[in-house]
Amino acid sequence: MAKVVCESCGSSFPLERVRNMDSCPVCGEALWESAAEDGEEEILSFGEGVELGENDSFDEDKIDFWWYDIDIKESHVYTTCTKCGYPSYAVCPIAQKGDYLLINPRCRDKCSHCGNEMKNHILSKRPESWVDPRKRDMWVKDYENIPKCPICSSTDIKKISLTNKAASALTFGVLSAGHVSKTYKCNTCGAKF
């Protein structure tokens, strides 16, 4: 079961009990201590008795997955790949410290979309500004790849069918060479190109 450890008094609590708390319910101290007051960098740990692996780092550039929800009953952590943004899930959360969550090092999660592998078992909470990549550009059309008429730049064009070309060749013979060699017809200005 996932737990949160207070560095001041050493008390540990089930994750679901202190999930949204900033201070320890026993001693009232902050659940994460900052060493930045002494001019040093902020050092984060999950408390005594919780060992980190060789690839585990709090550096945001080394975080492989973000977490956004925890299912305590199933021991699942719902995650998002930091490279492609697609959802995934990891099992066995061990401890939480602020917005950071430690996953069991035996967990070998891998993004099913891009193949990003979980090497760093420390997960950061997903940023508030995050937008699902599957919905981000859903209503935006890629106008750069739409063919346009070279005369009037209209996108209201239609492809000249093979049947139309064959009928024109049978009807007009050699005189239809200008029509048969073209691919599109503009519905706005009538140009063929």
Image: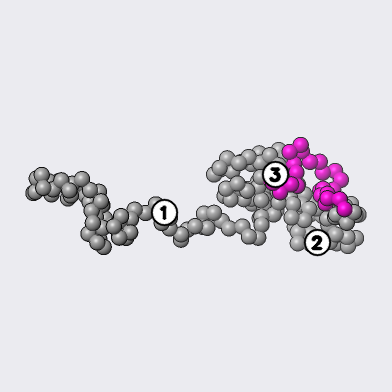
How would you rate the neighbour count of disc 1 (Cα within 10 Å): few for under 14, some for 14-19, many for 20 or more?
few
**Which amino acid, by three-letter code, is at mark 1?**
Glu
**Magenta includes 86?**
no
Q: Residue at x 77, y 52 (%)?
A: 96
Q: Which residue is mark 2?
A: 22
Q: Residue at x 74, y 47 (%)?
A: 59
**Which amino acid, by three-letter code, is at mark 2?**
Asp
Image check: 80 left or right of 155? Answer: right
The first of marks 3 and 1 along the sequence is 3
Q: Label 2 vs label 1: CA separation?
A: 49 Å
State the residue in front, 188 or 54: 188
- Residue 100 shows in this picture: yes
The first of marks 2 and 1 along the sequence is 2
Q: Which residue is mark 3?
A: 62
Instruction: Give percent across and percent down for residue 112.
Output: 56, 43
Q: Which residue is mark 1?
A: 144
The total number of labels drawn is: 3
